[in-house]
Image (tube, helix red, strand yellow):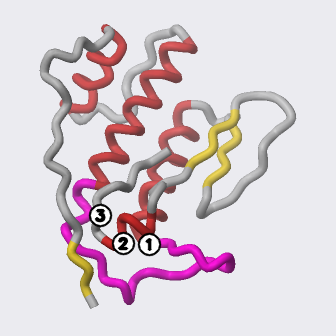
Amino acid sequence: MQVRRKRCSQRLDDSMTLTPLESSALASFRRGDFPPQPTGDERSDWIQVGLAIALNAARLLRGSGPSVDVAEVDLKSDGSPVTELDRRVEEMVRTALADFHPEAAIVGEEGGGELPTDGPAVAIDPVDGTWAYISGTGTAATT
């Protein structure tokens, strides 16, 4: 059984002003540079990589097609759904973060992980709103 998903037609306000860092991340994304080149400033690099990951996750979500085959939806032990898109987005995020900062701890909803007592750590929900994604309401996001 296929469930048709609605497409969101909202666009960002064209008058929205981007910071130089946001503009750089967006330009890098449009060129296909992923992950973006480091700037040398650790805080800026984390922001730039985070923006690049968010843009790539959005591309995966938008490109997933207008329907979900419910036969391809698995249920986790807690009864919540997991899709191939969940797995693909989480793997993309894990790979990008590991390439950027190999020492960073990564905890994902699908792949698990452990938070360290110190050092950088990132938590991932690859498709926040999987039920909404499956049902076609168009309200899923990556967090």
Mark-to-mark CA distance, 3 and 1? 16 Å
Mark-to-mark CA distance, 3 and 2? 8 Å
Mark-to-mark CA distance, 2 and 1? 9 Å
Q: Residue at x 22, y 23 (%)?
A: 27
Q: Residue at x 50, y 44 (%)?
A: 143
Give SS at disc 1.
Answer: loop
| Circles 3 and 2 in contact, beta carbons < 8 Å | no
| Corner quadrant of residue 62 | bottom left
Give SS at disc 2.
Answer: helix
- Of the residues under marks 3 and 1, which one precedes in the sequence? 1
Q: Amino acid at mark 2?
A: Ile
Tell me: 105 left or right of 13. Answer: right
Q: Amino acid at mark 1?
A: Thr
Q: Dot 1: few (<14), some (14–19), or many (≥20) neighbours within 10 Å?
A: many
Q: Residue at x 22, y 17 (%)?
A: 16
The answer to whether 76 is drawn above or below residue 93 in the figure is: below
Magenta highlight on residue 67: yes
Q: Which residues are magenta?
A: 62-83
Tell me: 34 left or right of 41. Answer: left
Tell me: 107 left or right of 129. Answer: right
Q: Which residue is mark 2?
A: 134
Q: Dot 3: few (<14), some (14–19), or many (≥20) neighbours within 10 Å?
A: some
Q: Which residue is mark 3?
A: 137
Which quarter of the rendering shows the N terminus? bottom left
Q: Position of residue 80 (x, y in %)?
A: 57, 74
Q: Amino acid at mark 3?
A: Thr
| Circles 2 and 1 in contact, beta carbons < 8 Å | yes
Q: Which residue is mark 1?
A: 83
